[in-house]
Image (tube, rainbow, N blue to C red):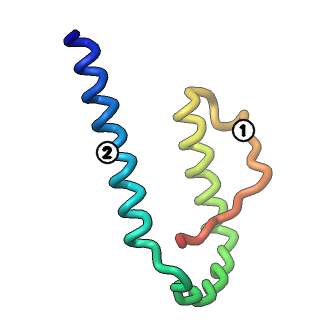
Amino acid sequence: MVVVLGMGIVFLGLGLLVLLCNIMRVALHREGAQTAPRAAVPAAPEISGVFKQKLLAAVTAAIAEAEGSDAPGFRIVSFVRRQKA
């Protein structure tokens, strides 16, 4: 009897939680409200050759340390810096 009562209470609580989430979704949903368009992100400045070499060396060393292997065994084919959104 205790197990059935406990499972029933948990089931009822989860049902109420789903109901509350649906009510909040409906209450907070704004029909037709659009966000303002984002401003264009300026292009990243070109990286100088010396800075790029240092950056690639640091990335190679970090990968080698994480994998526990030797850095000269790596060959970085492509490296693209991504802007923060």
Lower position in the chain sequence, tag 1 or tag 2? 2
Quadrant housing residue 69: top right
In the drawing, does residue 26 fall left or right of residue 14?
A: right
- Residue type at mark 2 is Leu
Residue 41 to residue 78: above or below? below
State the separation of the CA atoms marked 1 and 2: 55 Å
In the drawing, does residue 23 fall left or right of residue 58?
A: left
Q: Residues within 10 Å of mark 1 (few under 14, many from 20)?
A: few
Quadrant housing residue 5: top left
Residue at the disc numbered 1:
74
Please tell me the numbered disc located at residue 16: 2
Identify the residue shown where x is 42% and y is 57%. 22
Identify the residue shown where x is 24% and y is 20%. 6
- Residue type at mark 1 is Phe
Figure quadrant of the N terminus: top left
Q: Residue furthest right?
A: 77
Identify the residue shown where x is 42% and y is 64%. 25
Residue 36: x percent and y percent? 53, 89
* Element type at mark 1: loop
Please tell me the numbered disc located at residue 14: none
* Element type at mark 2: helix
Residue 19: x percent and y percent? 37, 51
Depth check: give the residue in front, 22 or 67: 22
Depth check: give the residue in front, 81 or 73: 81
**Camera-side mark, 1 or 2:** 2
Q: Residue furthest left?
A: 2
Residue 81: x percent and y percent? 64, 65
Residue 77 to residue 2: above or below? below
